[in-house]
Amino acid sequence: MRLPRDISPGAAARRTLLADALIALGIALLAFVLAAGIGIVAFVALPIFLILLTWIVTEAAVRGTRRRSGRSRTTNLSSNN
């Protein structure tokens, strides 16, 4: 089935408007799907990031404490000799 070739300018404008509206709807749906996907990824990634960051900070603090206590022990040992 073919569209009629001799259509009025008003009908052509309405068809163009319908096509533009359908394309815009498709782009909007695609944007919503992508944004929802990014939101889900961020929702899962944020707690994991916070846990890993806490782990790294805790390890650094423990290493710093061990280094400080290790230096004081060697200082105490060398002063006793």
Image (cartoon, grey):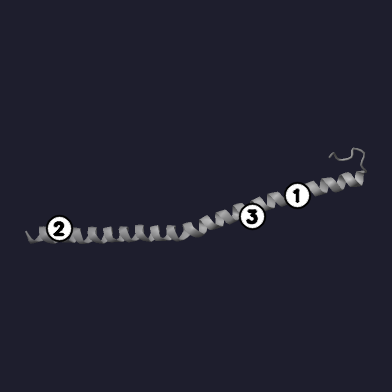
Query: Across the whole image, how many numbered discs are drawn on residues?
Result: 3
Q: Looking at the image, is mark 3 or mark 2 earlier in the sequence?
A: 3
Residue 46 location, x and y as percent? 47, 59
The residue where tag 2 is placed is 74
Which image quadrant: the N terminus?
A: top right
Residue 64 location, x and y as percent? 27, 59
Residue 22 location, x and y as percent? 75, 49
Q: Is mark 2 on a helix, strand or loop?
A: helix
User: Picture quarter containing residue 58?
Assistant: bottom left
The residue where tag 3 is placed is 32
User: Picture quarter containing residue 71?
Assistant: bottom left
The residue where tag 1 is placed is 22
Asked whether, in this view, residue 75 is left or right of residue 44, the answer is left
Q: What residue type is labelled 2?
A: Thr
Q: Looking at the image, is mark 2 or mark 1 earlier in the sequence?
A: 1
Circle 2 packing at 10 Å, graded few (<14), some (14-19), many (20+), is few
Asked whether, in this view, residue 66 is left or right of residue 3, the answer is left
Asked whether, in this view, residue 26 is left or right of residue 79, the answer is right
**What residue is shown at x 51% (from left), y 60% (from top)?**
43
Q: Looking at the image, is mark 3 or mark 1 earlier in the sequence?
A: 1
Q: Which amino acid does label 1 sit on?
A: Leu
User: Picture quarter containing residue 57?
Assistant: bottom left
